[in-house]
Image: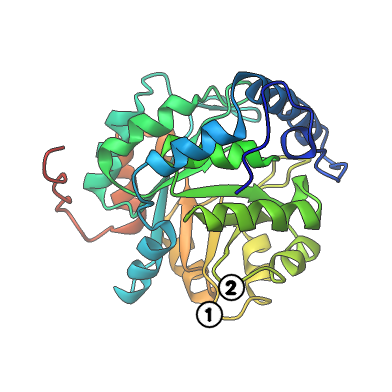
C-alpha cells in the first residue's frame, strides 16, 4: 500500500468525490457530511500512520466465514445491529451501552454484530465498535464510507467487515474501496436497493457479501418484496443478507426459503426491553438456552 499521503493532503485518495449524485436528499446530505469528515481525518493523520495501525491490529475474525458456518449448521446467519438513533425513527434506545448489548447478543446466539459509527445522523461513535469487541464476535462497521482513509481507519479500529452502499458510490470507486478492504483482510457487505445496483454488485468478486436493503432511501418505507424480487436474480452460491423490516419468525422462514442466507436486524432489537430475548424470539423461537460468554469475557 502507498504511504505517500501527508497531513492536510487534498489528494484523490483522501478527498475524492463519490462519482454519483444520489436521488435521496438525505443520502446526499450525509455524503456531504462524510466528505467533510474525510477531510478532517486527512488533516489529523496520514495514510502511512493508518496503515501502521492496521498492521498492529488483531487479525480479522472472519465475518463472512461466521455467516457461512451458520449455513453449514442449516440455519440463517444472524447479524445483530446496534443503532442508537436513526434519521427516520429518531431515538431508538436510551440505555445504549455497546459493550453490554454486544454480550447480550452473543449470549442470544448472534453470529456477527453491526455497529453504527456515524455521529451526525445515528448518534454513533467509532469507539462503539471497539467497545463491542468485548464479545469477540466479528464486527461490521456500519457507516457511509466513501474514501480509502475510512477503510484503513475501519481496520485500525478493529472492523472485520465494512459496509459499502451502491447508491453512494460510482462503480469504479466501489471496486477500489472493496479491493482495499479485501486486501486488508476484511469482508465487504455491499448494500443494494434495486435491480440496477444488484447487477453492479454481481460484477464484483463472489466473496463480496450482498446486502439487500428493504428500506427505500427516499420514503424510508420498508417492503420485503424488495428482497423477494432481488433474490430471484442471485445464484445460490452468493451470500445474501436481507436487511430492514424483519420483525417475526415467519418472515425469516419465508425469506430464507427465497434464498436469503443471513439477516441484519437492528430496529426490532433496539426497541425491545431485552434485545437478546427479542433475538431469540425472532431466530430461535424453540431455543431457551443461551450461548456462554467467551473465556475471559
How many numbered circles does the render carry?
Answer: 2
* Mark 2 secondary-structure assignment: loop
Identify the image quadrant of residue 270: top left
Is there a contact, CB below 8 Å, between mark 2 and mark 1?
yes
Using residue 296 as the reference point, say whether residue 79 is left or right of it. right
Kindly tell me whether residue 267 is visible in this rendering.
no
> Depth check: 179 or 246 in front?
179
Q: Residue at x 71, y 58 (%)?
A: 175
Q: Is residue 49 left or right of residue 216?
A: left
Q: Is residue 192 above or below residue 13?
A: below
Distance between mark 2 and mark 1 Cα atoms: 8 Å
For the point 76% across and 51% down, the residue is: 173
**Residue 65 vs residue 236, the one in the foreground:** 65
* Residue 258: image location, x then y, percent: 55, 74
| Residue found farthest to the front | 4
Residue 88, above or below 76:
above
Q: Residues within 10 Å of mark 1 (few under 14, many from 20)?
A: few
For numbered disc 1, what is the local secondary structure?
loop
| Disc ID at residue 19 | none
Q: Nearer the viewer, residue 168 or 226?
A: 168
Mark 1 sits on what residue?
A: 237
**Residue in the picture at 81% in, 33% down:** 28
Q: Position of residue 107 (x, y in %)?
A: 21, 46
Earlier sequence position, callout 2 versus callout 1? 2
The reply to whether residue 159 is in sight is yes
- Dot label at residue 206: 2
- Residue 225: x and y, percent? 66, 62
Amino acid at each position: 500500500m502507498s504511504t505517500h499521503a501527508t497531513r492536510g493532503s487534498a489528494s484523490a485518495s483522501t478527498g475524492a468525490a463519490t462519482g454519483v449524485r444520489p436521488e435521496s436528499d438525505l443520502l446526499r446530505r450525509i455524503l456531504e457530511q462524510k466528505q467533510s469528515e474525510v477531510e478532517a481525518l486527512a488533516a489529523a493523520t496520514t495514510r502511512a500512520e493508518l496503515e501502521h495501525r492496521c498492521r498492529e491490529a488483531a487479525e480479522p475474525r472472519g465475518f463472512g466465514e461466521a455467516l457461512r458456518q451458520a449455513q453449514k449448521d442449516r440455519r440463517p446467519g444472524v447479524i445483530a445491529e446496534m443503532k442508537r438513533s436513526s434519521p427516520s425513527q429518531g431515538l431508538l434506545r436510551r440505555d445504549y451501552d455497546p459493550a453490554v448489548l454486544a454480550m447480550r447478543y452473543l449470549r442470544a446466539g448472534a453470529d456477527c454484530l453491526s455497529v453504527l459509527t456515524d455521529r451526525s445522523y445515528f448518534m454513533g461513535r467509532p469507539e462503539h465498535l471497539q467497545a463491542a469487541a468485548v464479545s469477540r464476535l466479528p464486527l461490521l462497521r456500519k457507516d457511509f464510507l466513501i474514501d480509502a482513509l475510512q477503510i484503513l481507519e475501519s481496520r485500525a479500529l478493529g472492523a472485520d467487515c465494512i459496509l459499502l452502499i451502491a447508491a453512494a458510490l460510482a462503480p469504479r470507486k466501489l471496486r477500489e474501496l472493496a479491493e482495499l478492504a479485501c486486501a486488508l483482510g476484511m469482508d465487504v457487505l455491499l448494500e443494494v436497493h434495486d435491480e440496477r445496483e444488484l447487477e453492479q454488485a454481481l460484477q464484483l468478486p463472489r466473496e463480496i457479501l450482498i446486502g439487500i436493503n428493504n428500506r427505500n432511501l427516499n420514503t424510508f418505507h420498508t417492503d420485503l418484496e424488495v428482497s423477494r424480487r432481488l433474490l430471484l436474480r442471485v445464484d445460490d452460491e452468493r451470500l445474501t443478507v436481507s436487511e430492514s423490516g424483519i420483525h417475526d419468525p415467519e418472515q425469516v422462514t419465508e425469506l430464507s426459503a427465497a434464498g436469503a442466507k443471513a439477516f441484519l436486524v437492528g430496529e426490532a432489537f433496539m426497541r425491545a426491553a431485552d434485545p437478546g430475548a427479542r433475538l431469540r424470539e425472532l431466530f430461535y423461537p424453540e431455543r431457551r438456552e443461551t450461548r456462554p460468554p467467551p473465556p475471559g469475557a
